[in-house]
Amino acid sequence: MKRIHPIDVILHKRDGLTLTDQEIRAFIRAIVDRTPKKQLVTDSQIAAFLMAVFLRGLSPRELATLTEAMRFSGEVAYTEALNTFTIDKHSTGGVGDKTSLLIAPILAAAGLAHPTPEGVPGIVVPMISGRSLGHTGGTLDKLETIPGFNTQLSFAEMRDVLKQCAASLIGQTPHIVPADRILYALRDHTGTVESAYLITASIMSKKLAEGLNALVLDVKVGSGAFMPTYEKSKLLADLMVETGEASGTRTVALLTSMDEPLGRFSGNWVEVWECVDIMRGTRHPMSRDLIELTNILSGWMLHLAGRACTPEEGAKLSDQILHSGEAYKAWLKIVAAQGGDTTIFADPAAHHIPTATRTLTAPRSGFLTSMDCKQVGWAVQRLGAGRANPGDLVSAHAGIESHAKLGDRIEEGQPLFTLFAEDEALLDEPEKMLRDTLRIRSKPAPRPPLIHEVITANEPKPAIR
């Protein structure tokens, strides 16, 4: 077979030509097979390839092949061997976005309630999650505030947890989609992070490595979203749905609002605390949007898994599972199976021990009409709950509590946010950031819809309100 040279791949894409399957697969294999003594492709060549893709984009066939090559660049889960329905959910990230901590046990409870004849849960959720970076939070950082919780399971260990608990929440290891780890590190240094094509390949290669039958995507729009405009968020959603379907995985994307923090808390342990409260039956008014979005996403998952005739019926079933306490039982099983200490949930509030707190109050009466949610996320990060660079340490107890939502009537002196940190000196800058971004007006503004659009393989569906 004719050898494919990396420079030819780069030149072809630079010049707007369509890459062959062989070119894409050879380039990705060369990236993964590199050793210190055998540089089949250099960092400079990888960077040039990324920039060529950034500028030229990819055809649907090229994108599907790139995603497939990355997916199989390392270990894959082979959850097909469980002979069950395998489904997951992915979010493009936001502030206070903790739905994974609720969705995994909700779907696990549904799967445990209807096991297969072999005794395996009828639905399993093999969830590979990420860490916080920039203004967005990370599911792994939240889970690791639970003493002993092990997110670094191998796929074999994950399958054992799935058999017992129907859900497992793990992180990407060096053996899972190694091509993505290499490409992502260089994207961060080459100004190509925002490419919807490269984002799609990165996200979908990891998700499809789980061996999924179906996938539900939560693509954020608004001031706190990763993508800067609605149009770019929609393009990303379209590409991910198209790529998932091309792989044989039923894929649905929901464009959801990220114009304010989701739920009551934003941080790490405080978000776990909020979810545990919900699963134990305590529904704080500030958690209404979190519960609604969780049920909508879970509803689509239950519908795709055949547990509900429609997504709306699935959302009702999701809420019933939450109310019944079955999701909390499933949560305890998952935590215990991954080495976590479940006794901490007896009084989660007692484990919130920030060294310093401060409450930001309203300077005037009126209506809370807007905020830059990305700025709120950066304030949370500066308090110590997030990281500016991969590898930075994060605080378990830093974060914020929201006391008002967009559209609410506000009275002068009313609490708007409570800030938490482990150092008094860390409070000043985030407080100023929050004060600068909040807008209180004399007249109310329309509340942004929670769900803007639902995208399936066929055509967009009406938004669920």
Image (tube, rainbow, N blue to C red):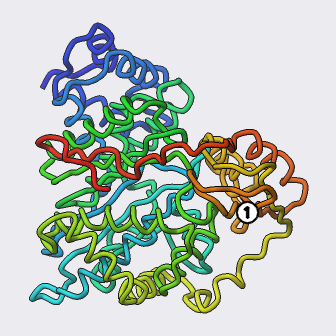
Location of residue 176 with respect to 62 vertically, above or below: below
Location of residue 458 with respect to 119 vertically, above or below: above
Location of residue 133 with respect to 333 vertically, above or below: above
Amino acid type, label 1:
Ala
**Which x, y percent locates residue 292?**
40, 65
Q: Residue furthest right?
A: 425
- Judged left or right of residue 91, residue 424 is right
Circle 1: is it few (<14), some (14-19), or many (20+) Cα within 10 Å?
many
The residue sitting at 56% across, 51% down in the picture is: 407
Image quadrant holding the C terminus, namely bottom left
Task: Write down the quadrant of residue 384 in the picture.
Answer: bottom right
Q: Nearer the viewer, residue 255 or 34?
A: 255
Counting every numbered tag in the picture gives: 1
Q: Is residue 152 visible?
A: yes
Q: Nearer the viewer, residue 45 or 390?
A: 390
Q: Nearer the viewer, residue 352 or 190?
A: 352
**Which x, y percent locates residue 167?**
34, 75
**Which x, y percent locates residue 391?**
64, 51
Image quadrant holding the N terminus, namely top left
Look at the numbered disc 1 and give the secondary structure of its residue. loop
- Judged left or right of residue 144, residue 153 is left
The residue that label 1 is drawn on is 398
Q: Is residue 134 visible?
A: no
The residue sitting at 27% across, 58% down in the picture is: 76
Q: Nearer the viewer, residue 361 or 196?
A: 361
Location of residue 332 with respect to 56 vertically, above or below: below
The residue sitting at 64% across, 89% down in the picture is: 347
- Judged left or right of residue 213, residue 6 is right
Q: Residue furthest top?
A: 15
The residue sitting at 16% across, 67% down in the picture is: 80
**Which x, y percent locates residue 320?**
31, 82
